[in-house]
């Protein structure tokens, strides 16, 4: 079994094993087994970095075996510079979520942990699939464990939120399925994604394919105006669900634009780039303003995620090296920062059972260690230089300025609004005198929570100070993608 298969099936196997352990008396054993499974799942992704060859856009760690031979469908895996980092990132976030959920989840613990491990394997499968039908199966299968996580362990309106999440994402994906079937027939009966990249499609076919893929991927990102499911889901989802949703699942949609929309329909991608840039700027500017008026911490961070992902799609569709690389860096950085923001809210919620900003005030007086970490993550969410949140957004802004000064100016303006809503929330929750007796009774983070915060803080600072290991992996694949869509490479 290859490394990518191990990365996919190790967490799924442990997840299936956890589902078989149904006794409530085995809760501690379940937690430790989940932690061991997530750690092993992360460990098997580490050799990928050692073995990854820089300077080539070719797919690496390729595995191919017949699956459904009558339809020429293969179990075909591989990663390049565009998809590589999302494999270890997914496994890493899974470890963090398992540790973060150690005490907060007390019912059906085996099912909760099992669902997260299975979800981890399925998401890695999305980033690794080189067969169109295999991609679709993994892409849709991720809905099932996340639907259960929201619907079983979520808040009071969890059923509504889970149903909305499932419907929005499933309906968009049906058009993608039609596009995949069309490409299968156009390629002479092949689901090989690389073969689809070489198809000579006319302008009408490319336009229809572009919007079919847009329907699936824009909802997943989510782009404005199909973003309305995200705040509802974040508010109702358990902390671990929000962390994984923001850190990884939103990236599946953005990744789809690079793997399908741009290389398969390059002419349509260029023709409709104005639409993508417009929608991205609306997300960055308008949704940022919406975030400012939120009273619920989770909802505020959810809207900020929409704004930050707007930078990703903006970077992709200005069509230069800096923009695409910046979008990819922003995806990884957002994985660390948004995951940390939601886990920080979870720390407070576990103690106070409230996400309302008005219920807090002066938390720094009772939880100084935690407040220091929260400040770092808030600054990263603002895009402070030296943190992961700065690097990708700065690259995208530079790329946008190269393409059009006014687009770059509009995107740069959004950084001010990001600072406004992030710091405004931090001020009301953490600073000033102790807000009430509940805040006065808060206890600072323990060793387990400190470990989670410290690991995420190191990741946020390391990527902010030294992003080169991330960009070096991407460069060749990004250059090859832009060459494929026949645009001048900007140095």
Image (tube, grey):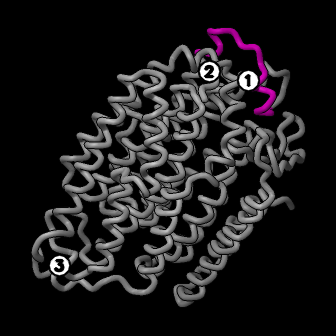
In-front residue for pair 480/206: 480
Disc 3 designates what residue? 439
Indicate the secondary structure of the residue bearing disc 3. Answer: helix
* Neighbours of disc 3 within 10 Å: few (<14), some (14-19), many (20+): many
Mark-to-mark CA distance, 3 and 2: 53 Å
Q: Is residue 93 left or right of residue 2?
A: left
Q: Nearer the viewer, residue 414 or 199?
A: 414
Q: Which is closer to the viewer, label 1 or label 3?
A: 3
Mark 1 → mark 3, Cα distance in angstroms: 58 Å
Q: Which one is earlier in the sequence, the residue at label 1 or at label 2?
A: 1
Position of 346 relative to 323 (above/below): below
Quickly name the residue at label 2: 209
Report if residue 345 is visible in the image: no
Instruction: Say few, some or many: other residues with alpha carbon within 10 Å of mark 2 (under 14 / 14 to 19 / 20 or more).
Output: many
The percent coordinates of residue 430 (x first, y second) are: 21, 69
Q: In this view, does 375 lie above or below 401?
A: below
Secondary structure of the residue carrying numbered label 1: helix
Residue 170 visible somewhere in the drawing: yes
Residue 153, located in which quarter of the rendered image? Answer: bottom left
Q: Which residue is drawn at 73% across and 36% down?
A: 132
Looking at marks 1 and 3 on the same chain, the residue that comes earlier in the sequence is marked by 1
Residue 3 x, y percent position in the rendering: 80, 60
Q: Is the C-beta separation of discs 1 and 2 under 8 Å?
A: yes
Q: Name the residue under label 1.
A: 183
Residue that sits furthest to the front in the current view = 491
């Amino acid at each position: 079994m290859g490394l990518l298969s191990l990365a996919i099936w190790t967490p799924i196997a442990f997840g299936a094993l956890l589902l078989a352990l149904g006794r409530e008396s085995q809760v501690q054993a379940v937690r430790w087994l989940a932690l061991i499974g997530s750690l092993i799942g992360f460990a098997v992704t580490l050799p990928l970095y050692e073995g990854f060859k820089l300077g080539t856009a070719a797919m690496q760690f390729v595995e191919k075996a017949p699956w459904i031979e009558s339809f020429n469908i293969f179990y075909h895996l591989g990663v390049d510079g565009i998809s590589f980092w999302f494999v270890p990132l997914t496994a890493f976030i899974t470890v963090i979520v398992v540790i973060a959920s150690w005490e907060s989840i007390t019912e059906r613990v085996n099912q909760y942990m099992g669902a997260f491990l299975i979800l981890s394997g399925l998401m890695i499968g999305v980033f690794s699939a080189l067969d169109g039908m295999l991609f679709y199966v993994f892409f849709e299968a991720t809905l099932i464990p996340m639907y259960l996580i929201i619907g079983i362990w979520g808040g009071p309106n969890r059923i509504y939120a889970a149903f909305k999440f499932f419907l929005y994402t499933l309906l968009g994906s049906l058009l993608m399925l039609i596009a995949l079937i069309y490409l299968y027939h156009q390629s002479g009966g092949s689901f090989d994604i690389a073969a689809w990249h070489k198809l000579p499609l006319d302008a009408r076919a490319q336009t229809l394919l572009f919007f079919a893929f847009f329907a699936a991927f824009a909802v997943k990102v989510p782009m404005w105006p199909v973003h309305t499911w995200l705040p509802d889901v974040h508010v109702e989802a358990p902390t671990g669900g929000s962390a994984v949703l923001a850190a990884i699942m939103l990236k599946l949609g953005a990744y789809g634009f690079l793997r399908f929309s741009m290389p398969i329909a390059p002419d349509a991608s260029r023709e409709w780039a104005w639409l993508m840039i417009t929608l991205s700027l609306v997300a960055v500017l308008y949704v940022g303003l919406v975030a400012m008026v939120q009273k619920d911490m989770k909802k505020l961070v959810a809207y900020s995620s929409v704004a930050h992902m707007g930078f990703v799609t903006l970077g992709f569709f200005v069509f230069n090296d800096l923009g695409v690389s910046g979008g990819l860096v922003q995806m990884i950085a957002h994985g660390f920062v948004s995951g940390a923001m939601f886990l920080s809210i979870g720390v407070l919620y576990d103690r106070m059972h409230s996400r309302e900003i008005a219920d807090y005030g002066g938390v720094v007086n009772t939880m100084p260690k935690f407040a220091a970490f929260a400040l770092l993550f808030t600054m990263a969410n603002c895009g402070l230089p030296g943190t992961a949140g700065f690097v990708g957004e700065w690259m995208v802004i530079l790329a946008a300025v190269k393409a059009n000064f006014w687009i770059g100016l509009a995107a740069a303006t959004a950084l001010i609004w990001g600072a406004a809503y992030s710091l405004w929330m931090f001020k009301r929750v953490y600073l000033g005198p102790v807000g009430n007796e509940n805040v006065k009774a808060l206890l600072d983070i323990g060793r387990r929570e400190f470990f989670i915060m410290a690991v995420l803080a190191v990741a946020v600072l390391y990527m902010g100070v030294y992003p080169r290991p991330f960009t070096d992996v991407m460069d060749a694949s990004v250059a090859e993608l832009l060459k494929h869509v026949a645009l001048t490479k900007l140095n």
